[in-house]
Image (spheres, rainbow, N blue to C red):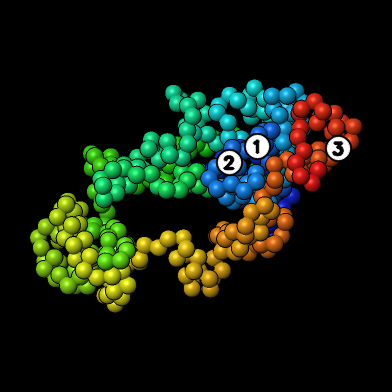
Amino acid sequence: MSYEKPFNGLKVLDLSQGFAGPYCAELLAQYGADVTKVEPPEGDWGRGLGLVYGDQSTISMTANRGKKSIVLNLKNDGGRAVAQDLAARCDVFIEGFRPGVCARFGLSYDDLRRINPRVIYLSISGFGQEGPYAREAATDTVLQAFSGLMSINHGNDDIPHRVGHYVVDCVTALYAYQALSSALYARRDEAEGRLIDCSLMAAAAALQTSKIADYHLEGGPPAENNAPAGGYGTQDGFIAVTLVKEEQYKQLCLALGQPALADDPRYLDFASRAAHMDSLGPAVQEIMLQHTTAEWTARFKEAGVLCHAVADYGDWLADPHVVATKAFQMMAQPGMPSVPLAQIPGTAPIDPGDPGQQAPALGQHSRQVLTELGYDDTKVEALAAGGAVRFGPEN
């Protein structure tokens, strides 16, 4: 055990698919855990999401690095028996099915606690294990809409937009990792494990706690906290401007060459500016269109205004600060061109050529996992012949 690999020796069984559950398990792997990923014969559906190379997508690659993959058919008696054997020996069990599915496989928390009393059991679902919506299908976009996140993300077209990334999945993975880490720390003094129910619904709400509180107190959609912060078009692009103190509004007005805006009674403080963004926003936008992004950036920085050009991913990868701080590394992944991999905050830098850091091919470790369970060649081949297990490359 070390600061770099505090979970060294921890055995994790990951039955989740997509991004939220797999990324949580991948974080455990990055901190040293031995993570075995159980996939159905067709593979984790995340393997086919987005840009795909062979049996790997960028989604599955970033969410499954450092794991071992075994293909088990849980609709098969033999496949379920193998999964139950693995579950009996793990420290952490992660599943992402709808409520009730794991019970059909003999892999519910109650099933596991009888054979593995100290297991930490994490269930990740759309709406949680109980309630009217518990068995409804849910995705990141569904929860962005359900949670209110889209309602506060209006574009210039005044239409609610989804954030263009799996932000709810990501934050669910982080909250789940936090809960697992805390439970593992507490388990040192506990005789039994515990069930952790972590839903996308709860995570999306936790992410927006202050906005939900604002809505309640204001009796409706919350006003902007720091108007006229936001993104504005320039002659050649876009720039984001923000304020955190009242005096910064005056600095902004001076940089815009419009000192009169600072003295306008409609715009005297954050609250009044938020109430009059229908006039202030267009006024600022009209001025912004008079110069380029670079010119505004120079003006604003000289005036002490917080701002930055709206960059794309290519801009980020080429940024000298990003390069100097080694914020990403080019990762080698079999069957896929070398890809930039952002450094996970708080983790030690990885060796991008280390095969142990790569995401596994479908069923790549099926035989290895079965051998580690103590199954002899005869039993392994019988399981394969009966359709319980499938082998991938290197088997």
Contact, CB < 8 Å: mark 1 with mark 2? Answer: yes
Circle 1: residue type: Gly
Res 43 label? 1
When asked about the image quadrant of residue 221, the answer is top left
Residue 23 in the image: state x and y as whole percent: 58, 47
The residue identified by callout 2 is 48
**Sequence-wise first label, 1 or 2:** 1
Q: Is residue 290 left or right of 327 when viewed as pictured?
A: left
Residue at the image point whose x is 56% and y is 69% from the top? 326
Can you see residue 280?
yes
For numbered disc 1, what is the local secondary structure? loop
Quadrant of res 116: top right
Q: Earlier in the sequence, mark 3 or mark 2?
A: 2
Residue drawn at the location 66% of the way across and 59% of the way down? 332
Provide residue 329's location: percent of width, then percent of height.
Answer: 60, 64
Mark 3 Cα shell of 10 Å, populated few (<14), some (14-19), many (≥20): few
Give the residue drawn at x 46%, y 43%: 168
The residue closer to the viewer here, 176 or 160, is 160
Type of amino acid at the residue the image marks with label 3: Gly
Q: Which residue is mark 3?
A: 374
Label 1 neighbour load within 10 Å: few <14, some 14-19, many 20+: many
Q: Is residue 256 left or right of residue 308?
A: left
